[in-house]
Amino acid sequence: MHQDAQVAMIHRLFGHIDAGTTSYADTIQHNPITRYTCAEQFSRERQVLFRETPLLLGLSARIANPGDYVVEDVDGLSILLVRDREGGVRAYHNICRHRAAPVATGAGNARRFTCPYHAWTYGLDGALKAVPDADSFDGICKAENGLFEVPAAERHGLIFVRPGGGAAIDVDQHLAGLEDDVSTYDFDTFHHYRSLTIERQMNWKLCPETFMEGYHLQYLHRNSVGSIFHSNLMVFDHFGPHSRLTLPRQRIANLRDKPESDWHLVPETAMIYTFFPNVTLVVQAGHVEMWRSYPADGVPGASRVQVSVFTPEAVEAEKARAFYEKNIDLAIRTVDGEDFPLSEHIQTGHGAGAHDAVIYGRNEPALIHYHQSLVAALTG
Ligand code: FES
Ligand SMILES: [Fe+2]
């Protein structure tokens, strides 16, 4: 965030702290639990949100150098994300044109991708380079049988992919005004520290939703991060379907004695960005966490969450590693140890059909905005 905007945001936070308020929606809202259980809704989400919408797959550092690649499971669709020789980001369906075996697994650096089944070989640009016993394929045209490429775009250190193919991605247009803010973080200079996968028996939306209000901090998280932050106090802003929550730490009070030129937002807050529809990016002093939530197993009640941690410097020294491990451990313990088990119980309750709807309070504006955005995307 630009410095003048940081100062304005800190004034908004002090306003809420002094008045005992938070950002409010105009009215409460009831959200039907079928949004978490209905097969028809789920099938539409899979098509519209996880195939047609540009999805944030990572910061640039996930594939930092030419030849770097990573395979991502996007709701059952294997996507091969590659940095090509020219330094551009490319995305392919990770499916061999011969008989559809995956041509890559995991992550690494490669000059080419050789299918493990019959050794058809593709370049970083997706072109089919070699076919063993090509005579048996009756002069198959290599130029027409490269990997199936889908739109990918990189801007402000963020990588987006439209997994199902379609129009090229205009990142700034997609970000709907959020680009001005995210461009100030220099995400393109961050380093990938590590990633992990969490599988949970809960609808994929329950992951982004758990980051969308600060109302629960003093209760659910009273033994972890609850005392670090102000509870039930967040500044909410939205940009198209995306949103930003600014959550103040208790220690922000120290800024009151300092000149505004020394007011910096990130050390005093957690900045929680929702990149519609499935990614939460938490920016805080020291590191950035990206939580990407996808449907799993083709059912509404299961999800796969990919957590990636990025750091402003490469973590090499043991002391630095210990510092990051401690911070990351607290984040994982809080979300995976406290939020997600509760989310699984919520999903079980929804599945049992004992109630019709959940209620969002006026103090939960991000949840209300999120579901309005989902309805608009799915019916638009
Ligand atoms: S399936 Fe890839 S070479 Fe046969
Ligand atoms: Fe939480």
Image (cartoon, rainbow, N blue to C red):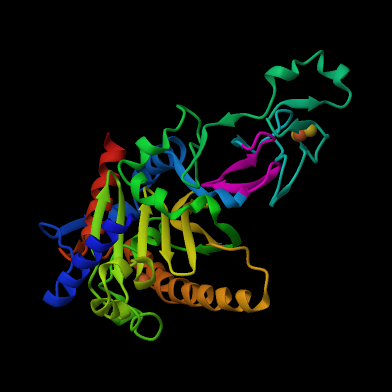
Query: Where residue 139 sits: x, y (%)?
Result: 81, 13
- Which quarter of the rendered picture does the N terminus lie within? bottom left
Q: Give 189 or 343, whichever is nearer the viewer.
A: 189
- Identity of the residue furthest to the top in this view: 139
**158 above or below 18?**
above
* Quadrant of the image occupied by residue 149: top right
Residue sitting at 34 percent across and 72 percent down? 268
Question: Where the C terminus falls, by quadrant?
Answer: top left
Foreground pick, 127 / 207: 127
Q: Residue at x 35, y 81 (%)?
A: 228
Ligand 2 sits in quadrant: bottom left
Residue 212 seen in the figure:
yes
Compared to 178, does 148 lie above or below? above
| x, y percent for residue 17 | 18, 75
Query: Is residue 355 visible in this depiction of the protein?
Result: no
- Residue at 66% of width from left, 33% of height from top? 86
Q: Is residue 236 left or right of residue 293?
A: left
Q: Is residue 72 magenta?
A: yes
Provide residue 249's location: percent of width, then percent of height. Answer: 32, 76
Q: Position of residue 28 (x, y in %)?
A: 13, 60
Find out whether residue 50 is within the magenta segment. no
Total labels: the figure holds 0
Q: Residue furthest bottom?
A: 223
Magenta segment, which residues? 63-87
Q: Is residue 129 left or right of residue 317?
A: right
**Relative to 365, is 333 on the left or the right?**
right
